Image (cartoon, rainbow, N blue to C red):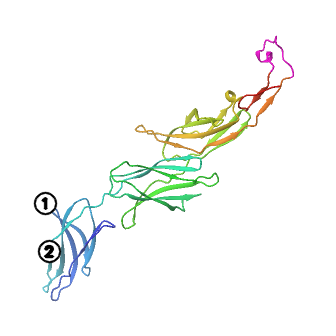
Amino acid sequence: QITRCPSQIKLSWTPYYGYGITVSKYEIIEVDAQNNETKLQECAGTEKSCVIELNEQKERRFYVKATFMDCHGKQQSSTSTMCYVSEKQANLPKFISIENISLEQTDITLDIRFDTAADYNTYVLYKSYNDEKNFQPLDTITIALHKTPLYTFVDQMAFTNDSPVFYKVKGYDKCNTEIIESQSVTPIIASVREISEMQNMIEWTQNAPWEVLQYRIWKNENESDAQLIDSVGNQQFMYLDDLDDSYARCFSLCYKIEAIQNNEEKTVRSFSNKVCLTKDYKLLIPNAFNPNSNIAENTTFKPKYAFLFGDYKME
């Protein structure tokens, strides 16, 4: 009898009967293609079956050997018929890896890499809020065997600022026995605060699912497309943005952190949430000017403003 979950073979036999004798033990003997014999297991004389593990061999041969004392006190043995088994052990997945976890507004995107060479294609994605203890099933993932190993899952409306969220993936066999588990991951969380009118401090958590090569700081001015403003090493988790170059034109500033994986073979990225600050505009009017001044700024009469976007009209 072959039990696929778990991958085992159950061997059963009829007990050996003889007048006045008691079987002391049964031995499971495997015979290979070269007729070499190996004792796999020893069972008590009262047992009638045992379980052995399947392996990578497609065809196997077994017999059962009973050992007992005869009526003259001599040790004897009796062997069963040969049992032929043709079965190959399932190819178990060697890895599950969550390669990327990124935030886009309130949606969390996971890129999960599976071992598509395995004979299993159904996995369960788990999710936990606040800690890495109370994981609950979120979804069942079915992948195509021997196809693209990367699977993308989007957990919509999953991110909130006040509740961290964690994910991991588990694989099960056909008997619902866990056979493999991925690492636990959580998004990189960024925050921003105003140090002064001219400086913003961006900070982020160290939550990348792999070793980071560097962090990149992206910035949006007035809801325009994000621009890369700087990059820092993998041991730095804060950045001071000096607003001197954008003092006049920016009333809205948003930031996002990009983590780059330290891997020479491929480039993998994770993105944090986007955090924003709205600056209060400043508008100053000079009460004098000097057309003959040596200071160019003093030769023109016009408003001086900051964090104000667009044109103005003075009457």
- Asked if residue 119 is positioned above or below residue 73 in the image, the reply reads above
Q: Could you tell me how far apart the alpha carbons at marks 2 and 1 are, in whole angstroms? A: 18 Å
- The number of numbered discs placed on residues in the rendered structure image is 2
Which residue shows up at 76% across the image and 34% down it? 281
From the viewer's perspective, tell me whether residue 4 is left or right of residue 19: right
Locate the N terminus and report the quarter of the image it occupies: bottom left
Q: Which residues are magenta?
A: 287-301
Residue indicated by mark 1? 34
- Asked if residue 315 is positioned above or below residue 90 in the image, the reply reads above
Q: Could you say whether the residue bearing mark 1 is in a helix, strand or loop? A: loop
Q: Nearer the viewer, mark 2 or mark 1?
A: 2
Q: Position of residue 315 (x, y in %)?
A: 83, 25
Q: Nearer the viewer, residue 204 or 286?
A: 286
Residue lying furthest bottom:
20
Q: Nearer the viewer, residue 251 or 115?
A: 251
- Asked if residue 118 is positioned above or below residue 66 in the image, the reply reads above
- In which image quadrant can residue 238 be found? top right
Numbered circle sitting on residue 81: 2
Tell whether position 300 is magenta: yes
From the viewer's perspective, tell me whether residue 176 is left or right of residue 283: left
Q: Position of residue 291 (x, y in %)?
A: 82, 13
- In which image quadrant can residue 312 be found? top right
Which residue shows up at 80% across the image and 15% down it? 299
Which residue shows up at 79% across the image and 25% down it? 303
Q: Could you say whether the residue bearing mark 2 is in a helix, strand or loop? A: loop
From the viewer's perspective, tell me whether residue 48 is left or right of residue 303: left
Q: Amino acid at mark 2?
A: Thr
Q: Position of residue 225 (x, y in %)?
A: 59, 35
Q: Amino acid at mark 1?
A: Gln
Q: Position of residue 152 (x, y in %)?
A: 46, 49
Tell whether position 126 is magenta: no
First in sequence: mark 2 or mark 1? Answer: 1
